[in-house]
Structures are given as structure tokens and as C-alpha cells.
Image (cartoon, helix red, strand yellow):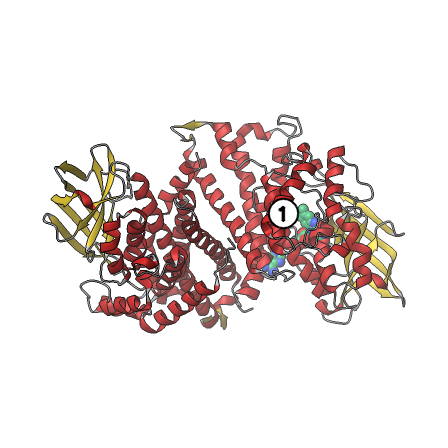
């Protein structure tokens, strides 16, 4: 195998030749992100080409094995690829719950058939996944979920409802937690299943967020047939899979705390908006808050880097992911509080901003959900206290 | 470079930890205080540290050193921080050694480095003149007089000033800032030692028409500000490493107490109000570990260091170590306030280290300035 210097050079050349200019800009709008899926409408030819070129190398999922559509890179090479992508401010070719959530447990616990069925379409961005975890009465206490799956031999019949399904209306398939044993203790009667959302009996209803957008739904299952060969792990042992997936989801969400590649640092946004006096920001209190924030931002980035350097390939971060999730999401909330302060009264218009879309206040509102989705901040602190620090009770 | 320690560094860490656990735990500091030791540290212990090679870590092999670099000395400082062990490691083995290695003439290196590496020669950076750290505001002057310079001025709160054989003194020269190596027994040097609130000692040092030969100039004439900043950043990173050890230790003692102390019939660690604060502190300490390691590695890799990273690290460590120490007292309740109990020592030491070479607010400001805002 080529040494890392060669790998870096080749990667740089390939990206130079293949990453379209318009894909080297930071996201401005939610629509700038490419989520793939059966009904994907590409924003531009560039966006489509970028996804297809990256997928052809397996670089939408650089560390997955090649036979599942991945790039087969080791961790050192993946780090190099990441650095080279950041160097040119390249946008991620694909955003995907399939990659960040379902992929890791499927790779670890899935049968060979399931891997071959589901992973390559995820890597190519052909199938978009939704997460069916939360229910109206099972939020933080997720394991108390009640969606009912009755055993019919080679399949289940599932009934019940899920809530807060992010992009529930856009998902092609759902990975879902269902109860298969009502007698057992709550953690012991759960099964992790997958089904096509076009299956008869599946329906969704949009829920509007405080940001005015409607990116999630309530999801109803009415006598839905789910094949038993679509179970990951053992029947009634879904909690193991669920937790493993959550630790990856949390790690992913934590990344929100790091400055997206190509975005302006808060201090730079502030300097442009407020100006400097004698080389320093003209508002001293805001300046101090921004400096504290940027210190913590750097801390998080370095600590994620350190954790990656420490963790061997494939090993779950486990409870440490909870620490990252807490830190990263609280940080992202601070970022948007500061950006709102910097923009002042200008940011108060619902249809304001340069393009009349009011992106900033809407993003600010959306960040309030960061410390709720994927398990609340309080729940993350509970996990750190008990699993890492070994505190009782 | 990967943000992990290599084999050699892990071994150094282990041996430092086991040596200090047995030879210089916190009770060692308490004994020094209770016996009102005149110097506030143990010469015997220092000789043992020298036998272990610690003052030689930063010194290149050709001068009798080990050449383990900043990461090496930082690892040891983290361990002395854990035990609150008073020693000349930071001032001599890190800042002092760095000064001579980085800027010393051949003659200065040959005369000083072997003795530094052997632990026989102690150094101190004399740079502060005002109560709040402002190292660029220098009124101490060095006036050229033939082949010599005459140094006059007063430096305050010089860490290890009470024991240093040689001071590294920042001065104003005709056209800028210059550093000089001034032996303590030069005529006109007067040292006023005192005990600090953490029972480590320091000194104010006055220079009254002190005559030094021009060969005592360290680094460039009139252009020494960059060197001064570099040495301060080295010291800041070392103090941060010490604070990292201190903060981890005080946190781990607090965790033990949370599991052991019972009220309302249950361990106090089962109360969510305390659990969440402990969990938050855990996260902050993880951040601090990454910062200190990165700052040390950067000193090893970048010839001029990274001032922004040094300030970021010092600011964050000052704040976090302080939080860890104050939370420790609060979570221990009444016993945390007693002199008999060791927890208070951690807060005291933390106060000194936070102030050393600029406190967390100073570095918050410097960080922002260096980032251009
Ligand atoms: C933007 C967004 C997207 C989401 N996307 C999805 C998705 O795609 N799929 C999906 O399944 N779910 C999704 N969720 C749901 C999310 O996982 C839940 O909202 C979350 O787990 C909290 O559950 P809850 O809303 O029922 O709040 P509750 O559990 O009722 O919590 C209410 C409050 O009580 C606190 N609390 C609860 N228990 C404890 C405790 N033991 N100790 C201390 N405090 C406690 C919580 O921290 C919170 O502050 C999403 C949520 C949001 C906001």
C-alpha cells in the first residue's frame, strides 16, 4: 500500500480535479446540504457530480470496507482525506443518518445479507433513512417505548406511533425500535427493525418547529408488515443495538460545536459587523464572551481529534460520546447566541437578512433543539456521572 | 502528530508518578510548611529528581541532557502538579533550560547547561514589575558602559527568585528590550524572599547599578522581546501542565468523597445536583488534557512556538483548575474548609499557578488580540 505522503499527494490532486468550485463554499442554507434518497432533487449539476464522484471512490464513507461501498481507508488515511477536504473547504458530498447512525451498528452487528442489502445504497446516497426511536410517552426514558410488534412467524405486524421523526416525510426507510416482549423488563423486550416507509400502513404527519420549518413528523404504523430478516441483532436484544447507535449519533451531533469548514469564525463576523478600535473589537463585553467561546471551540476540536487518535478503528466511544454531545451542543447554542448579539436588531426580522429568508434567527432557534435531540443535555450528564465517573444511584 | 503519548513518554509518566507518590505526596508539602522550611522545598528531594534525570529532560544530549523535549518535561510537571510538589522544575528545568538552549551563546551553553542538567545550577526568570502581569512594560534599564552593562530596576514576585543562582532579567536597552543573565552574587543584587500563600516561596529582586559583562547578554541586543515572549509561553505551558495535574487530582479526590460520604442515608454522589456538576467538570478536564498535550507538542515542533495556543491553554487551565478546586471545597462541605484536610492546598497552589506569567483573564485578552480582535 502507498505510504501516507503519496496518499496525501494523490488525494490532493484528485480533489483538485474533481471537487467542483461551487462545492468549495460553506453552506448558507439548509438546502445546500445534499441528503440523497429516492426523491432527491439535486440543487445543481455540481452537487450531483460531487456526490457521484466521491461515491465512486467510496469516499462518502471512507473507512467502510470496499465491498459495502466504502473507501477501505485506514484511520490515518481517513484523517488525511479529512484534512485535504478541509483545506479546500469542500462541502460534505452527502449528509446521511444512514452513514452517521445506522452504518456503525449495521457494520458491527448486522448479518452479511443485511450489510450487502443496505450499506452500498447508503454509501451512494440512494436511500435516505429516518430514525424511529422516540414516542409520545418515551423520550428521555426511551426504553419505556410501547410500539407493538406481534410475531407472525417469518414477520412481525407492527402498530403504534413514533414522534419527532427528523425528515420523516423524506425518509425512504426507517430503523425503528419496537417492543416484542411486554412481559420482560423494559430494556429486555425491545427489537431493532428496519422497513421501507412505502410499506402499506405507514403514514406521517408534519410537525412545525419554532424556527417555522417543518423538518420532522409524527409517524404512524398501522398493521405494518416487517420481515424478520430485517432485524439487526437478536430479537429482544435491540437495546444493545440502540445504545451503540446512539453513541454514534451523539458523536455526530457533537460535531456541531466545531466551526464548519469554510465558515467564518464568530470573531471575524463580529469584527466585520462592529469594527475594531485600536485593533480590538469595539464592544469589550461581547469581545470577552467571544474569546471564551472560541477557546472552548478549539478545545472541543482538539479533544475530538485526541479521542480519534486514542480510539482504535470500530470501537464505540461509548459513554464519552455523551460528554462530547453535551459539550458540542451547548457550544453551538452559545455560537448562535453570540451571532445574534453581533447582528443586533438586524437579526430580529423574521424575513430579514440579505436574502429575505431570515436564516440567522431561524438557525438560532433551531440550535435550541441540539441539546434535546439525540438525548437531552441532562441525560448526557447523567450518563457521564454514572458510566464514566461511577457515581451511585 | 497524533495527540497521544508515545511509549517513551508513557514510561516517563509512570516512573514520575510512582516516584512522587512515594517520595513527595501532598504530605511532603505539609511537612515543609509546618516545619517552616526556609526555602520551601527540599534540596534532598531535588537531588533525587536530578538522579532521575528530570532537570536534564530539556537539555540536549551534547550538554549532558536527555533531549526528551517539552512534552517530556510537561509530563513530569503534570505529575508534580498532582502532588503539589515544590521544586525548581518549572523555573530551572523548563523555562531556564529553554532560555539557554534557545538563545544561549556557545559559552553560555557550555558553562550553564551541564550544571542545569545536573540540578546544581538554579535559574529564575525575572520579568514582572507590576502586580498585574504586564511583561512588556519594562522600566528596568541596562545601560552600556564600555564592555559592560549597568542594570538597575526592581523585579517583583520572581518565581524561584529566592534560590536562583542566576537570574534571566528583562531590561530596557538603548533601542529596545534585551535579556541578561545576572548571577545572584553580583554586586548590587538584593533578594527579598517571602512565602507565598501556597507555601511555595518567591522573591522580589532589586538591581542597583549591577555591572555585568556584555557576554551576559542572552539572545539579541535590543530585539529580545520575541525571546521574552517565547520564554513566557514556555513557562505558561509548563504552569498549565502543572495545573492539569492539580485539577485532575483534586477532582479525583472529590469523586472519591462523593462515593463515600453519606447524607440522608445515601452517598452524596447520588444527588443529581452534584452529579451534573461533576460530569461538567469531567468534560472540562478532558478539554484541558487535549490542550496541554497539544501545547507541549507544538513547542517541540514549532521553533517559535504558538503564542495563541499558549494563551488559550493558560487561560482555560487557569479557569478550569480554579473551578475544580473551588468545587472540591464546596462538595466536601465543612471538612473542605479545614487546614487539617489537604483539599485547601489545591486551591492555594492553583491561585499561584494561575497568576504566574499572566492569569486567565490576561490570557483571554491576549488570545483575542493575537486572533486580531
Ligand atoms: C430537533 C429534534 C430532532 C429530533 N429527531 C428525532 C428523530 O429523528 N428520531 C427520534 O426518534 N427522536 C428524535 N427527537 C426526539 C428526542 O430524542 C427527544 O425529544 C429527547 O430524547 C427528549 O425526550 P422528550 O422530548 O420526551 O423530553 P422529556 O424526556 O420529557 O424531557 C423533558 C425535560 O426533562 C428532563 N429530564 C427527563 N428525564 C430526566 C432525568 N432522568 N434527569 C434529569 N432531567 C431529566 C429532560 O432533560 C428535559 O429537560 C428529536 C428531537 C428534536 C428536538
Mark 1 secondary-structure assignment: helix
Image position of B26 with respect to B70: above or below: below
Location of mark 1 (residue): A81
Image position of B210 with respect to B322: above or below: above
Residue at the (79%, 40%) spot, across then down: A40
Task: Name the residue nearer the viewer: A152 or B96.
Answer: B96
Residue B21, image x, y percentages = 36, 71
Residue at the (81%, 47%) spot, across then down: A204
Residue A296, image x, y percentages = 49, 47
Task: Name the residue nearer the viewer: A66 or A165.
Answer: A66
Crowding near the residue tagged with mark 1, few <14, some 14–19, many ≥20 C-alpha atoms within 10 Å: many
Task: Name the residue nearer the viewer: A249 or A89.
Answer: A89
Residue B216, image x, y percentages = 19, 46
Q: Is residue B3 left or right of residue A138?
A: left
Total tally of numbered discs in the picture: 1
Q: In this view, does B165 lie to the left or right of A40?
A: left
Q: Is residue B190 left or right of residue B301?
A: left
Whether residue B46 is visible: yes
Whether residue B160 is visible: no
Q: Quadrant of residue B33?
A: bottom left
Residue at the (74%, 59%) spot, across then down: A106
Q: Is residue B123 left or right of residue A264?
A: left
Image position of A7 with respect to A263: above or below: below
Task: Name the residue nearer the viewer: A108 or A239.
Answer: A108
**Residue labelled 1 has its Cβ within 8 Å of some atom of ligand 1:** no
Q: In which quarter of the image is residue A185?
A: bottom right
Q: Residue pushed farthest left?
A: B187
Tell me the chain of label 1: A
User: Which quadrant would the C terminus of chain B be assigned to in this image?
Assistant: top left
Residue A317, image x, y percentages = 60, 60
Residue at the (82%, 41%) spot, across then down: A39
Amino acid at each position: 500500500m502507498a505510504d501516507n505522503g503519496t496518499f496525501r499527494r494523490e488525494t490532493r490532486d484528485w480533489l483538485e480535479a474533481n471537487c467542483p468550485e461551487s462545492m468549495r463554499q460553506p453552506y448558507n442554507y439548509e438546502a445546500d446540504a445534499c441528503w440523497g434518497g429516492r426523491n432527491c432533487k439535486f440543487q445543481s449539476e455540481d452537487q450531483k457530480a460531487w456526490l457521484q464522484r466521491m461515491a465512486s471512490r467510496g469516499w462518502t464513507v471512507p473507512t467502510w470496507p470496499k465491498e459495502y461501498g466504502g473507501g477501505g481507508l485506514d484511520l490515518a488515511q481517513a484523517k488525511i482525506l479529512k484534512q485535504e477536504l478541509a483545506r479546500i473547504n469542500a462541502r460534505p458530498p452527502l449528509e446521511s443518518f444512514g452513514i452517521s447512525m445506522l452504518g456503525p451498528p449495521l457494520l458491527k452487528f448486522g448479518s452479511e445479507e443485511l450489510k450487502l442489502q443496505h450499506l452500498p445504497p447508503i454509501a451512494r446516497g440512494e436511500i435516505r433513512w429516518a430514525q424511529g426511536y422516540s414516542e409520545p410517552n418515551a423520550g428521555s426514558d426511551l426504553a419505556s417505548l410501547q410500539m407493538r410488534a406481534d410475531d407472525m412467524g417469518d414477520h412481525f405486524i407492527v402498530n403504534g406511533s413514533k414522534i419527532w421523526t427528523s425528515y420523516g416525510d423524506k425518509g425512504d426507510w426507517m430503523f425503528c425500535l419496537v417492543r416484542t416482549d411486554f412481559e420482560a423488563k423494559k430494556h429486555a423486550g425491545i427489537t431493532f427493525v428496519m422497513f421501507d416507509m412505502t410499506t402499506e400502513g405507514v403514514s406521517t404527519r408534519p410537525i412545525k418547529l419554532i424556527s417555522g420549518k417543518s423538518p420532522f413528523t409524527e409517524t404512524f404504523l398501522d398493521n405494518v408488515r416487517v420481515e424478520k430478516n430485517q432485524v439487526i441483532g437478536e430479537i429482544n436484544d435491540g437495546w444493545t443495538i440502540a445504545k451503540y447507535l446512539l453513541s454514534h449519533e451523539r458523536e455526530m451531533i457533537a460535531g456541531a460545536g466545531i466551526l464548519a469548514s469554510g465558515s467564518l469564525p464568530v470573531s471575524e463576523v463580529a469584527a466585520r459587523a462592529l469594527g475594531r478600535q485600536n485593533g480590538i473589537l469595539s464592544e469589550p463585553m461581547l469581545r470577552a464572551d467571544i474569546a471564551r467561546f472560541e477557546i472552548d471551540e478549539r478545545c472541543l476540536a482538539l479533544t475530538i481529534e485526541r479521542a480519534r487518535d486514542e480510539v482504535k478503528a470500530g470501537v464505540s466511544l461509548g459513554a464519552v460520546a455523551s460528554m462530547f454531545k453535551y459539550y458540542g451542543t451547548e457550544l453551538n447554542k452559545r455560537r448562535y447566541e453570540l451571532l445574534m448579539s453581533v447582528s443586533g436588531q438586524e437579526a430580529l426580522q423574521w424575513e430579514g437578512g440579505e436574502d429575505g429568508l431570515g436564516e440567522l434567527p431561524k438557525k438560532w432557534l433551531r440550535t435550541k433543539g441540539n441539546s434535546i435531540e439525540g438525548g437531552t443535555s441532562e441525560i448526557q450528564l447523567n450518563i457521564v456521572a454514572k458510566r464514566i465517573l461511577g457515581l451511585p444511584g | 502528530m497524533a495527540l497521544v503519548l508515545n511509549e517513551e513518554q508513557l514510561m516517563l509518566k509512570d516512573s514520575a508518578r510512582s516516584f512522587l507518590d512515594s517520595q513527595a505526596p501532598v504530605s511532603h508539602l505539609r511537612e515543609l510548611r509546618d516545619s517552616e522550611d526556609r526555602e520551601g522545598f527540599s534540596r534532598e528531594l531535588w537531588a533525587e529528581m536530578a538522579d532521575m534525570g528530570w532537570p536534564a529532560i530539556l537539555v540536549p544530549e551534547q550538554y549532558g541532557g536527555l533531549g526528551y523535549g517539552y512534552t517530556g518535561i510537561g509530563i513530569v510537571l503534570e505529575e508534580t502538579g498532582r502532588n503539589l510538589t515544590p521544586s525548581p522544575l518549572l523555573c530551572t528545568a523548563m523555562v531556564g533550560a529553554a532560555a539557554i538552549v534557545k538563545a544561549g551563546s556557545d559559552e553560555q551553553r557550555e558553562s550553564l547547561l551541564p550544571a542545569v542538567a545536573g540540578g546544581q545550577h538554579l535559574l529564575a526568570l525575572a520579568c514582572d514589575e507590576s502586580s498585574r502581569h504586564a511583561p512588556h512594560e519594562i522600566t528596568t534599564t541596562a545601560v552600556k558602559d564600555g564592555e559592560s552593562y549597568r542594570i538597575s530596576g526592581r523585579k517583583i514576585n520572581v518565581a524561584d527568585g529566592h534560590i536562583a543562582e542566576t537570574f534571566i532579567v528583562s531590561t530596557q536597552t538603548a533601542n529596545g528590550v534585551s535579556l541578561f543573565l545576572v548571577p545572584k552574587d553580583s554586586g548590587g543584587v538584593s533578594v527579598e524572599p517571602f512565602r507565598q500563600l501556597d507555601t511555595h516561596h518567591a522573591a522580589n529582586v532589586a538591581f542597583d547599578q549591577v555591572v555585568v559583562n556584555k557576554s551576559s547578554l542572552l539572545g539579541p541586543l535590543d530585539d529580545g522581546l520575541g525571546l521574552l515572549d517565547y520564554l513566557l509561553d514556555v513557562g505558561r505551558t509548563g504552569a498549565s501542565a502543572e495545573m492539569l495535574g492539580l485539577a485532575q487530582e483534586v477532582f479525583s479526590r472529590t469523586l472519591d468523597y462523593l462515593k463515600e460520604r453519606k447524607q440522608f442515608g445515601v452517598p452524596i454522589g447520588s444527588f443529581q445536583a452534584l452529579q451534573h456538576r461533576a460530569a461538567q467538570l469531567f468534560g472540562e478536564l478532558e478539554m484541558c488534557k487535549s490542550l496541554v498535550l497539544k501545547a507541549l507538542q507544538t513547542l517541540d515542533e514549532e521553533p517559535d512556538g504558538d503564542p495563541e495556543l499558549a494563551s488559550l491553554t493558560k487561560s482555560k487551565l487557569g479557569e478550569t483548575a480554579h473551578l475544580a478546586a473551588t468545587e472540591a471545597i464546596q462538595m466536601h462541605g465543612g471538612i473542605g474548609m479545614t487546614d487539617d484536610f489537604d483539599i485547601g492546598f489545591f486551591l492555594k497552589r492553583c491561585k499561584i499557578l494561575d497568576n504566574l506569567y499572566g492569569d486567565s483573564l490576561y490570557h483571554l485578552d491576549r488570545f483575542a488580540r493575537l486572533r486580531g480582535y
